[in-house]
Image: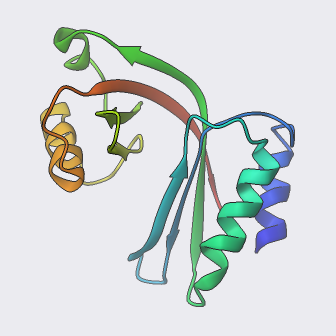
Amino acid sequence: MFETIKKSIFQKYKKNDIRWVFFSIFDEQWALLMSNWVVYTDKALEELINLLYQGLISRHTNIKTIIADIVLETTEIKSPQEIQTISPKDFGILLSDGTKSGVLLPNTKWVNNIQDWLKIIKEKNDLWNNVQVVKFKTDRFAI
């Protein structure tokens, strides 16, 4: 499975590209087994994929599907008005207060609007103070 992941991604991206990476793994009933991500990095894409796979993904034995999201572009959002215009279907969002952060990927099936999106991230990650907001697009690979 690891070789399939790398082959799929490296058909499109260079091994030494610097990119944010998200991995989510699911069992046969589509229950989420693990989700992990790396942002703001200086590590090459190949190294990140190896680290995530060896350190986290390979520990699971009942994997049915792996979804890898490679971030294409990021934009810091400065105004509350601009946040309200972000489509959860098209963009992911990262919230950070400098010590803690939380993220939801684009097109998360149980998130329908921006208010739910922000509430979920804030509650799950205890982010209630002023936060930096970054929206991003991804290229998704299902393996």
Q: How is the image coloured?
A: rainbow
- Counting the numbered discs, the total is 0
| Residue at (72% x, 72% y) in the render | 54
Residue furthest toward the bottom?
61
| Residue at (46% x, 71% y) in the render | 34
Q: Quadrant of residue 118?
A: top left
Nearest the camera: 66 or 78? 78
Residue furthest toward the front?
99
User: Above or below — where is 72 with respect to 45?
Assistant: above
Residue 143: in sight, yes or no?
no
Q: Quadrant of the C terminus?
A: bottom right
* Residue 94, image x, y percentages: 37, 35
| Residue at (71% x, 62% y) in the render | 51
* Residue 121, image x, y percentages: 24, 46
Nearest the camera: 85 or 120? 120
* Residue 101, image x, y percentages: 34, 43
* Residue 10, image x, y percentages: 84, 47
Q: Quadrant of the N terminus?
A: bottom right
User: Above or below — where is 6 with respect to 45?
Assistant: below
Q: Quadrant of residue 19?
A: top right
Q: Give the side of residue 80 with respect to residue 32, left or right.
A: left
User: Above or below — where is 29 with respect to 9?
Assistant: below
| Residue at (86% x, 43% y) in the render | 15
Q: Give the side of residue 62 with respect to residue 89, left or right.
A: right
User: Above or below — where is 50 with respect to 22?
Assistant: below
Q: Give the side of residue 112 with respect to residue 50, left or right.
A: left
Residue 142: in sight, yes or no?
yes
